[in-house]
Image (cartoon, grey):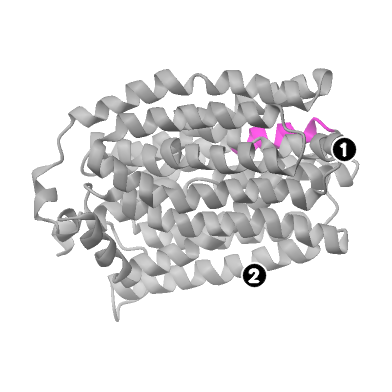
Amino acid sequence: MLSISMGIRQVFGLFVQPMVKDLGLTLSDLTLAISIQNLAWGILQPFSGALVGRFGFRPILLAGAALYVAGLGILSAANGTASVMLGAGVLVGASLACTGSAISQAVASRATSGPRRSIVLGLIVGVGSLGALAAAPLGQSVTNVYGWRAGVLAVLALASLLFPAAWVAGRVDRIPLPDTASRNRADKSALAAMRLALHRPAFLVMTTAYFVCGMQLLFIATHLPSYLALCGMDPMLAPEALSCVALFNVAGSLFFGWAGSRWSKLVLLGSIYVVRSLVIAWYFAAFPTPASTLIFASAMGFLWLGVGPLVSGAVAEMFGLRWQAMIQGIAFMSHQLGSFAGAFGGGLVFDIWGRYDLAWHVGVGLGLTAGSVQIATALIRRNPGAPTKLIPAFPAHCRE
């Protein structure tokens, strides 16, 4: 389910340039639609998580599948800004709140326990990125021959597989919550869980840094194809780069899922932000080549969604499983606000200045700042007064 929903969502950038030419829209119009998608996803994520806590996973997952298919259908018939924003923006965004990473990781958390959980979360996130390996070449090849509308319909056919995937994933409703969850203060009610989360400094720092994570990722996913086209690169280089992101994300997600079971998840999160920012600075500082682009995409892929198992695992450790989808949704809302800023802000910067320099400079600066603060806060909180080092991660009841 995650592979299909995230894979299709990651290739929307392939349709931007053809839609600009066909519909007479500006780049910022199209990136606004993708930004609205991320905004709707983020705003609705806590609500879908709360509904899961009340009604179970299966009805929410199936509703998300229906929203995805409807959104792609409207996008394929779009003839102006409003229909693009409704299809690619609002409906796909609402679907992702029901089928995307936060809900999928909550499903996986329910089905696992103990040290295995972080590793399994990394596996879910890693395999979940493989959808782009099918969606990117499928969408690009059909678009090249038949036009962007046919390309959207091609990925719509892929999206129909969400229904059986969501049905099977919904079986997790049969698994009862662990007994220890009933003793967690966050298990009493959605409101109590939300209050507890918003008064936990570690959660607030992680949530704020997550904003910068979303800004960086959506800037790359949305604007890399346009940037390569402006630099005169082969049109197939963009889907090749997105495929590299998806492929290396598997290795990165597995690695950080494994690492999160051994070291501080919050320190690892900050390290990802710092290294990712340095990679972005290296790539955009020079004129791109096919080799540098594929190296950049591979490095970004390794650092792409490794944050997923770390954030999900940290939330489960802090607050338990009953309202994990909702609390993780609160953090994810921050991530998606950053995604809105990255996608729309990048398009706005280009429309005003005709280049992306300011956008990547801001992304690098904020990434280095957020990563450093995340690492420092985690080390001070976990081991006050001791030398700074990675601290082994222990179950929440052991720390307490």
Determine the residue positioned at 78% across, 34% down. Answer: 237
Residue lying farthest to the bottom in this orientation: 385
Left or right placement of residue 217 versus residue 391 in this view: right
Q: What stretch is highlighted in magenta?
A: 235-245
Q: Nearer the viewer, residue 182 or 379?
A: 182
Quadrant of the drawing holding the N terminus: top left
- Kind of residue at disc 1: Lys
State the count of labels. 2
State yes or no: residue 242 in magenta: yes
Left or right placement of residue 268 versus residue 74 in this view: left
N-terminal-most mark, 2 or 1: 1
Q: Position of residue 51 (x, y in %)?
A: 30, 43
Residue holding disc 2: 365
Quadrant of the drawing holding the C terminus: bottom left
Q: Is mark 1 on a helix, strand or loop?
A: helix
Left or right placement of residue 369 versus residue 324 in this view: right
Residue 400, visible in the rendered structure = yes
Residue mark closest to the camera, 2 vs 1 = 1
Determine the residue positioned at 23% across, 42% down. Answer: 54
- Kind of residue at disc 2: Gly
Q: Nearer the viewer, residue 290 or 341?
A: 341
In the picture, residue 197 is in which quadrant?
A: bottom left
Residue holding disc 1: 21
